[in-house]
Image (cartoon, grey):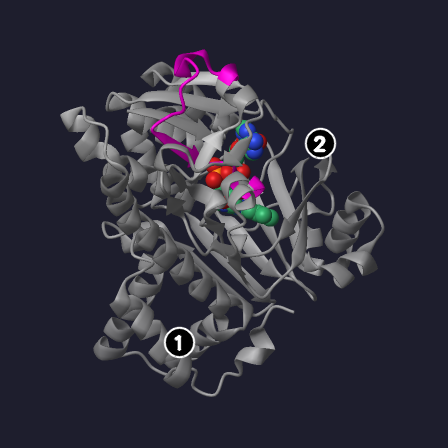
């Protein structure tokens, strides 16, 4: 099977590795874009076993920092810290914080070592009706990959991230989420720390929220704020980030005395799920299919998992060394697209609990319930609830019907007088 993968981000490179290992002929189009900073620096625990399967966990450990957990800092008295090890073995006991450009390089090198043919070119796709396909590589893109010898591939994979090349070519609509924020971030040296090494800190700001992601030698500090609030903070990204650090007492205690050692990168922060993820001869993976808000860091997991799912869907054909018919390919990709959509929806629902204050209200209510006198039954109930939240937020079982149902029930009946609106992100 000849597969063209467009985009050498984490998703494209991971899929190229999985497919090349199974004997597919893979042309991996890399646009050669290498910015100094890329978002996607904090990974969830469910990524760790995928890194093992890709054979890059050891290398990741050399440039990444082990992330033992996450702390949510919503006010001077509302600080909740979680370590993944507490939920092991159901949850992998650790994840990583990674400088993304270095991580992407490692994944790409793995794909090339597995036999993928890297083509440095900005690919273009065109709608087509030829040979039952819906999309084709544009002539100059086809010509750029000698491996394809001028013949359209059996499958085109759109791994172009937010560029969403296939959705644009085919005008596929998307379901868009409620927020439209802007994110600014940079790396710092010489920061102060008030938590465990490697712990990721997510803090509520007067408007929006911030992240602190520690690496071996640097700290990534980012803010995610509404556009009007961003304008109020300053004119340029650097002014806004600096001002956000100065005016927030807690953020200032961490990064106020630190030195910025990179430029300030800017991203739009919105949420999007494509209404169609595959068609005759093509499929979307990773961010090209959809992305959710980054507060809980699911993006790279969703990207790598979608690569695995597509590789698994193609595996019966690769094992038998047959080219699937359009109908066979369609039915193999249909279940992948359904699973990917349900993961995107489940993550979007979970993150909404943090934005509207229900999750922090539940944590506060749980704490005061335990402070009011503990018992064996109360302890067991609290552990049960925390375990199911951890299973979702770690990526291990985000789509579990029981875990999601439990959270919904608690959101309605377990708040014990705590008002979620007081703990919402503005
Ligand atoms: C503010 C913010 C913070 C985030 N923080 C986190 C986090 O902490 N943890 C986390 O897991 N996720 C985070 N994410 C999400 C994460 O960055 C993405 O989900 C992840 O990068 C998706 O990987 P991908 O491979 O699908 O796409 P990408 O990483 O976008 O890779 C796509 C690649 O395709 C290339 N490309 C595009 N068009 C073409 C073309 N025409 N031809 C060839 N190549 C092309 C691009 O240059 C790029 O290299 C964050 C996102 C935002 C907005």
Q: In this view, which residue lies farthest toward the bottom?
A: 417
Return the disc, 1 or 2, that comes first in the chain's sequence.
Answer: 2
Residue 383 visible in the displayed image: no
**Residue 158 lies within the magenta run:** yes
Provide the residue designation for mark 2: 261
Say if disc 2 is inside 8 Å of ligand 1: no
Q: In this view, which residue lies farthest toward the right?
A: 235
Does residue 179 sit above or below 157 in this rendering? Answer: below
Q: Quadrant of residue 344?
A: bottom left
Residue at 23%, 24% (x, y): give it.
Answer: 22
Q: Is residue 233 left or right of residue 268?
A: right
Tell me the crowding category of disc 1: few under 14, some 14 to 19, or many 20 or more residues within 10 angstroms, Cα based: many
Residue at 77%, 45% (x, y): give it.
Answer: 237
Q: Is residue 84 left or right of residue 122?
A: left
Provide the residue designation for mark 1: 366
Q: Position of residue 280 (x, y in %)?
A: 36, 41
Residue 401 visible in the displayed image: yes
Q: Position of residue 376 (x, y in %)?
A: 22, 76
Q: Is residue 156 left or right of residue 295?
A: left
Q: Quick one: 168 or 152, which is closer to the camera?
A: 152
Q: Secondary structure at mark 1?
A: helix
State which region is magenta.
143-163
Q: In this view, which residue lies farthest toward the left?
A: 320
Q: Position of residue 245 (x, y in %)?
A: 73, 52
Quote the CA–CA distance across marks 1 and 2.
41 Å
Q: Is residue 125 left or right of residue 86?
A: right
Does residue 265 sit above or below 391 in this rendering? Answer: above
Q: Quick one: 383 or 109, which is closer to the camera?
A: 109
Q: Quadrant of the image for the C terminus?
A: bottom right
Q: Secondary structure at mark 2?
A: loop
Residue at 59%, 78% (x, y): give it.
Answer: 422
Q: Quick one: 253 or 286, which is closer to the camera?
A: 286
């Amino acid at each position: 099977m000849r597969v063209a993968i467009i985009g050498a981000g984490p998703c494209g490179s991971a899929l190229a590795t999985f497919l090349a290992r199974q004997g597919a002929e893979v042309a991996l189009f890399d646009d050669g874009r290498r910015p100094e900073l890329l978002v996607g620096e904090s990974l969830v625990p469910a990524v760790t076993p995928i890194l093992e399967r890709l054979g890059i966990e050891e290398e990741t450990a050399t440039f990444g920092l082990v992330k033992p957990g996450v702390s949510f800092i919503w006010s001077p008295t509302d600080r909740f810290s979680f370590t993944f090890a507490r939920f092991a073995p159901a949850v992998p006991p650790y994840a990583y914080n990674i400088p993304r450009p270095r991580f992407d390089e490692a994944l790409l090198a793995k794909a090339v070592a597995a036999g993928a043919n890297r083509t440095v070119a900005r690919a273009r796709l065109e709608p087509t009706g030829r040979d039952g396909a819906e999309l084709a590589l544009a002539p100059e893109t086809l010509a750029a990959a000698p491996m394809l010898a001028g013949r359209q591939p059996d499958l085109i994979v759109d791994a172009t991230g937010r560029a969403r090349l296939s959705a644009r070519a085919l005008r596929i609509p998307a379901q868009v989420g409620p927020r439209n924020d802007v994110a600014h971030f940079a790396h710092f040296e010489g920061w102060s720390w008030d938590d465990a090494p490697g712990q990721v800190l997510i803090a509520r700001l007067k408007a929006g929220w911030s992240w602190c992601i520690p690496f071996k030698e640097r700290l990534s500090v980012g803010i995610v704020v509404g556009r009007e609030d961003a304008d109020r903070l300053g004119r340029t990204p650097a002014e806004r980030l600096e001002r956000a650090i100065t005016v927030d007492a807690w953020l200032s205690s961490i990064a106020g005395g630190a030195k910025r050692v990179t430029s300030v990168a800017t991203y739009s922060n919105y949420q999007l799920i494509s209404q169609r993820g595959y068609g005759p001869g093509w499929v979307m993976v990773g961010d090209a299919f959809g992305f959710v808000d980054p507060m809980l860091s699911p993006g790279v997991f969703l990207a790598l998992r979608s690569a695995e799912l597509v590789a698994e869907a193609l595996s019966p054909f690769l094992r038998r060394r047959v080219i699937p018919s359009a109908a066979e390919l369609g039915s193999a990709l249909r279940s992948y697209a359904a699973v990917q959509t349900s993961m995107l929806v489940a993550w979007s629902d979970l993150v909404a609990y943090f934005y509207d204050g229900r999750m922090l209200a539940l944590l506060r209510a749980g704490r005061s319930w335990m402070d009011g006198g503990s018992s064996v039954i109360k302890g067991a109930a609290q552990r049960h609830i925390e375990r199911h939240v951890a299973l979702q937020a770690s990526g291990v079982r985000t789509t579990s019907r029981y875990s999601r149902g439990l959270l919904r029930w608690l959101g309605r009946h377990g708040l014990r007088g705590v008002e979620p609106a007081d703990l919402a992100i503005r």
